[in-house]
Amino acid sequence: MRVKERAGVDRREEMVTSGVPLPRDMNLYSTDELALFDAAGNPVPCQVKATARWGGSPQDASRPLKWALLDFPASVGAGGESLYYLRRSQTHILPPQNITVSDDGDTLAVDTGAAVFRLRRDSFHLFESVDVSGAGRVLSSSPSNGFFLYAGGKEYRSGAVSPTSFQLEEIGPLRVSLTVRGGLSAGPGDSLLHYTARIHFYAASSCARVFFSLENHNPTQPDDMGQPQCWDIGCPGSVSFSGMDLKLQPQTASCVATLSTGEGERGVFTSHEGDLSIYQDSSGGPWWDVHRHHYPRPQSYVSFRGWRAYGGETEIARGERAQPWLDLSGDGRGLAMGTRDFWQNNPKGLYGGGEMRLSLFPLQYGGEFVFRPGEHKTHEILLYFHAGDAEQAGVAGTMSALRSPLLALASPQWYAASGALGRIVPRDDTPAFAAYEDQNLSAFDPSIGPTGNSLLRSIEANDFFGWCDYGDVPLDYEVPSGQMNLKYNFDYGMLLQFLRSGDYRWWDLASPACRHLADQDILHYEGNIDHWSDGGYFGHSYHDEPGDSNPHRNYGAPHPDLCFAAPGGLLYYYLTGYTEARESAFEVIEYMRYRYENSYGRGNGEGYAEAYNDYGSHSFRPFSNGLRIMTEAYEASGDPAYISTAEWIIRCSHFASDPFLAAPQAGMDGGTSIFSLDLFTFSLGRFLDAINASGIPDREGAASYLVRLVRHQAANCWRSGSEGYQGYPYGWYYNGAIDDSFGVVDLSNWHLLSADCLAYAYLYGGGDDLMALAGQAFRTGSERPNGEGTEPAYWSSKESANSAVFGQVYMRAASGY
């Protein structure tokens, strides 16, 4: 595995948390069978956790390991790479000092060897105290410490009432993770918003990494028609507030403040009065004000470009995009603080003057902040408690690393061969696949093709930054200000392209995308589902929405017809251990399960999973999404209940497929779009792959069903179109006519999906001729991604999503991988 340094900072014994897939035929059952070695063959301390198994739950030691999460200390020079080898071996080595945890019932103490962190169970001020080896106490108990939210002239504090949950999620020799949940309260019975704080501690480190999620737990309030009023900013159950801070008071008699803006050559500022601050109001880019006055969109209140830094009340610097850290030191000890993706998640503030204050939602921003029911936002915070002053402690290096945490990446060949990511292949620039690879690269390279554009340029031009939008992509094929909500599993596609290529540009899109989706694109709920919308994903459904009043909550959602999220969220969790992504994925999973277990004559009848397409027929798309999500749920959990629901969905899908298979008939009503039918057959293929890998019989005859659908589609819908390209029209009417709205053959990269479905049918016994058709479909989708005369280039976020997600099943079958 390669560990690549990308922040330009030497890393020494920095803890890496990364997941690696393991092939089923390795037959590894215990994490004790794995050991890590450096390039010289020396054993490296490594903490290993099973996060998924082949055909069972992560805890089921009778099933082989599928994904393992590793924690280990890595050293790599600035801009360099280091190699590590994960082997089947019993040669384990422990760190010089394990993390130890003690709990007296009132206070939890985590001793990393470099620092002792204490937290009280009856109040959450983040830390009760922090003692650093060789420096003594850096942080003492104070009611002024913790998270503070300001609304209506009142102050709501994390320490005002006891947390509702205080749980050690992981205890290992190298990393300990604690999760605290509770309310931000002005006093007993007066909570406004809630929080989840995940705190990670590392062996031999005095750093604490905090993932703080601000959450609106208010339920939706259905209208008279039973529809959840959850879309608009300010809808019933919304909470408005003026700001929110993390405040900590280091224990120093004298104080020197050190501020780095993290931008270019602007240097580091120092104040012996301890009064330095920086405030980022907008993204700082050329289009920083493109949403200005588009009320009530969160970016509509921006007032100036970029950031400004102050010494006291005097401006000392200004710039565009800050990635700052702030340190307060004195008396031989200090504390440094920063948050990841500072400017991207604007507005943000960082203040020092007797106390340290990280403004996750700054009071000085021009507008109020509003969280709708079920809305979350998570920030990653790094706190470095240290001996000495900022220079002596190497604060610059430690905090600069926050911009780009280290990741251990296996080779594309390993990811493809593992089978854990399904049917994928490493990047392949041979002539047969070159157009496909160019289409993917056009997300970054505007020189590919005639448009002179790229996904990165589109994100920039539409200012898709700020705490609400960052991580999503623009709806630039309709209304560019609108949010695509990573439709058709674009987040998952970004991760696939990263793993099959090793190109970190995909990772830089995928990581914020997965974190955004886990927060913003899901209607989060507490406890059990009590309304069909709970846990729903807001897919882009109604077209041409500008997203100013209802960002990331399309008025046509949530519904199984456009429900994604789970594949990308789970894969991101396997790769990073980011628990928030897994939790959100399972909210969507349980939502989808509720919808189908209470539809089509089952349960309480209030699942309402039915949907009709533009042709007046039952749509294939809800069945596709339901089946895909149940498949992912089973692979993540090993729970056979998800297979049961998947089989129920397959049975229900005949409402859509029976008319299709009975067509064509003269005078018959209805029809289907080809891509929605293909989405369903693709999901059948994924389901078959999953049950075969787990030894589960095909009780619903899914293989013959898939082949029958694809053969019928090819026999009735396949056409030769313009420019010599072959494939399918956009849709097919059940009276035998085609929907030629986009030509006799729809020249688009939806044909990459068609190629995958044809390849799946071939793989499950459909005949060699289907692979020949798959090759033609792949050529059409690769060479004509967006209509007649087009070529690989960045056309819009939709084409980028389709290419990132589809085409791999065919490529693997065609290349014999």
Image (cartoon, grey):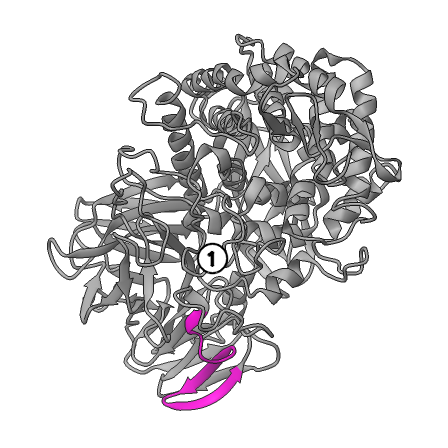
Report x, y in % for residue 507: 61, 50
Q: Is residue 724 visible?
A: yes
Given residues 795 and 22, the one toward you in this image is: 795
Q: Residue at x 26, y 43 (%)?
A: 223
Instruction: Report whether 289 appears left or right of 117.
Output: right
Instruction: Report whether 336 appears left or right of 702.
Output: left
Instruction: Report whether 791 appears left or right of 375.
Output: right
Given residues 378 and 402, the one toward you in this image is: 378
Given residues 740 and 699, the one toward you in this image is: 740
Membership of 685 in magenta stretch: no
Residue 42 sits above or below residue 424 on the image: below
Q: State the image quarter where residue 135 is shown.
A: bottom left
Which quadrant of the figure contains the N terminus?
top right
Q: Residue at x 53, y 28 (%)?
A: 616
Report x, y in % for residue 586: 41, 34
Callout 1: SS? loop
Question: Callout 1, which amino acid?
Answer: Gly
Label 1 crowd (10 A; few <14 / some 14-19 / many >=20):
many
Residue 42 sits above or below residue 592 on the image: below
Magenta span: 300-318
Residue located beneath label 1 in the image:
547
Residue 737 sits above or below residue 486 on the image: above
Report x, y in % for residue 419: 65, 27
Outermost residue, left side: 188
Q: Residue at x 50, y 69 (%)?
A: 291
Outermost residue, bottom side: 314
Residue 458 sits above or below residue 429 on the image: below
Which quadrant of the figure contains the C terminus?
top right
Report x, y in % for residue 247: 29, 68
Given residues 219 and 693, the one toward you in this image is: 219
Q: Is residue 172 visible?
A: no
